[in-house]
Amino acid sequence: MPLRKLPACGFLCVLALASCHRAAPPLPPAHPHYVIGGGWQGGGNWFYPAESFSLRQTGLAILEANQTPHVTADGEVWSANSMTGAHQTLQLPAIVSVRNLANGRTVRIRLNERGPDNAGRILAVTPQVAAVLGIGHDPAPIELTVDEEASRAIAQASPDAPRLDVSAAPRGDVVAQSLDGGIAQTVGEHQTGVVSTPGGLRLSELPVRYTQGYAMPVAYNVTLGDFSGHGAADGVARRCGGDVRRISGNDPGLNWQARLGPYQTIAQADQALAQARSCGIAGARIVVE
């Protein structure tokens, strides 16, 4: 049987489909390196990275938006299966612990990317981290704490980082202690898996592991700023319809905080954050307590 000729339009459609399935261009080779970087803009917000080895903050975590393979801000190749995440301002790479306040799970991850660009969210994680922490498509309340020893070890190993004259403490095991007096459990070695090479850093994957603690009730607040004097804090609070509270353990001399809240839902906190922006507070952010 003779073959029938394709109509001209059919032939063109086949060509169009073929062109749609071209292979994606190859990614550049991975080149992990230490980076702080300058201010960057995303979602109408400005973020200013800075080195910190003692940061502890609460806020909301989400899934990373860009889930296609790409080179991260510190030169790694992004993988959905890695225990990594994105932070707006911390040095990269950095090792942090992340606790999901809604279910009590805690993981250790490596920050290797900038983001999220939403000022109301402080952390974005890979699908692997989200699955281990029990984070779905909705934001989750979390506490983030920098692992000082591990993060300093990365800085010390990197030829790109400022030199730090700090003596590292002996490395031991990470021990999870039950809050109700139960038996402590060793969950893994306290290590970063970082090696300095002539071409930069060589980073090994962190284990897919979590420790289970207790869930806790949470409330959301929007901080408007920390101030040295009650009068200055009160002026900002009045302008935005908030209140003032005395705080401790913050930057020296900043003993007063203006804030909005508390709120019971993330939607209410997002509305309050928009309210803070409308009254001129560009640095407002959502915290969890």
Image: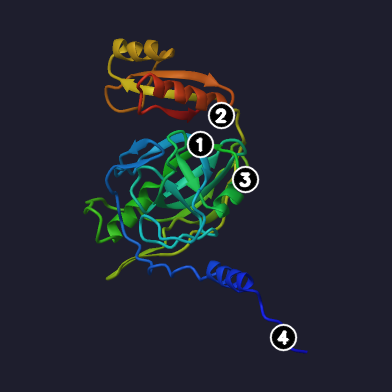
Q: Quadrant of residue 255?
A: top left
Measured in 3D between alpha carbons, the distance from the residue under mark 3 to the one under mark 2, in whole angstroms, is 17 Å
Residue 164 vertical position relative to residue 259 in the rendered view, above or below: below
- Coordinates of residue 96 in the picture (x, y in percent): 44, 47
SS for callout 4: loop
* Amino acid type at mark 3: Gly
Q: Badge 2 is on which residue?
A: 266
Q: Which mark is residue 134?
A: 3
23, 265: nearer the viewer: 23
**Residue 209 % position (x, y):** 57, 54
The kind of secondary structure element at disc 2 is helix
* Amino acid type of the residue tagged 4 in the rendering: Leu
Q: Earlier in the sequence, mark 3 or mark 1?
A: 1
Find out whether the residues at labels 1 and 2 contact each other: C-beta distance under 8 Å. yes
Circle nearer the viewer, 4 or 3: 4
SS under mark 1? strand
Look at the numbered disc 3 and give the secondary structure of its residue: loop
Between the residue at mark 1 and the residue at mark 2, the CA separation in whole angstroms equals 9 Å
Between 141 and 124, the one nearer to me in the picture: 124
Residue under pointer 1: 60
Tag 3 or tag 4, which sits nearer the N-term?
Answer: 4
- For the N terminus, give its image quadrant: bottom right
Disc 1 marks a residue whose amino acid type is Leu
Earlier residue among tags 1 and 2 = 1
> In the image, which disc is placed on residue 117?
none
Q: Which residue is mark 4?
A: 3
Taking the image as shown, residue 252 lies to the left or right of residue 1, namely left
Which quadrant holds residue 145? top left
